[in-house]
Amino acid sequence: MSGERAAGRSWFGVSIRWAAQVLFYGYVLLLVIAGAWGALFAPMDLDWLIGLDLPDPGQRSRADLLSQYRFLRAVEFGVGVVFLVFRKEVFSVRLLNRLFLVLMGSGILARAISIPIDGSPSPVFYFFLVSETLGMLAIFVHTQRTGFSQKGPFGKSREATASSTSDP
């Protein structure tokens, strides 16, 4: 019986690790690709993704909307690059793991709040909501099962960081 339980846990551990990795890379690569695309080709992105008809060229509201959209997409790109660079640390350093999960959770919360306030979005946005939620849960469960290394995000152990900042 204990052999069956061990095999079940092993299967679950492998499955949750696989799901966490696939959903992490899918999310982060989408941040990078969609962020870059939207920052560079904002009018086309707004039309394709949202079906938004922009005001006529020359109107300030068009420039304002495109400026803000490009900014937010560039931030999306940058966040994706940061977490792609620190991908190992997201799974091994508690601080970066929690920052990543807070970032994902904030986006999920914003999507969820938007539904009752702004109305039902198109199916692709429900797909994003579900896949982001599953990704956040899989990454959380996987990292809770595997634990974290003792090194902080800059290579120092927590003990070394605490002793160097405490008063003598």
Image (cartoon, grey):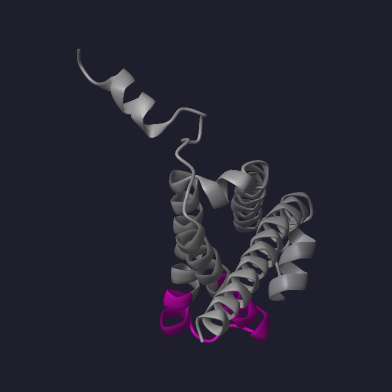
Point 48% across, 63% down: residue: 145
Instruction: Using the image as rendered, state which of residue 63 and residue 18 is in the foreground.
Output: 18
Point 20% across, 16% down: residue: 167
Point 53% across, 47% down: residue: 92
Spot the residue most to the left: 168
- For residue 75, say whether it is visible: yes
Answer left or right for 40 relative to 4.
right
Magenta run includes residue 74? no
Instruction: Using the image as rendered, state which of residue 61 and residue 24 is in the foreground.
Output: 24
Point 48% across, 35% down: residue: 151
Answer left or right for 29 relative to 7.
right
Image quarter where the C terminus lies is top left
Q: Image height check: is 83 above or below 27?
A: above
Instruction: Using the image as rendered, state which of residue 41 and residue 102 is in the foreground.
Output: 102
Residue 156, horizontal then vertical, whole percent:
46, 27
Q: Image height check: is 113 above or below 83?
A: below
Spot the residue most to the top: 168
Instruction: Using the image as rendered, state which of residue 64 and residue 101 is in the foreground.
Output: 101
Answer left or right for 62 relative to 167.
right
| Residue 26 in which image quadrant | bottom right
- For residue 52, say whether it is visible: no
Q: What segment is highlighted magenta in the picture?
A: 112-132
Residue 51, horizontal then vertical, whole percent:
72, 76
Residue 143, horizontal then vertical, whole percent:
50, 59
Q: Image height check: is 75 above or below 23?
A: above
Characterize the magenta stretch by its predominant secondary structure: helix
Residue 29, horizontal then vertical, whole percent:
72, 56
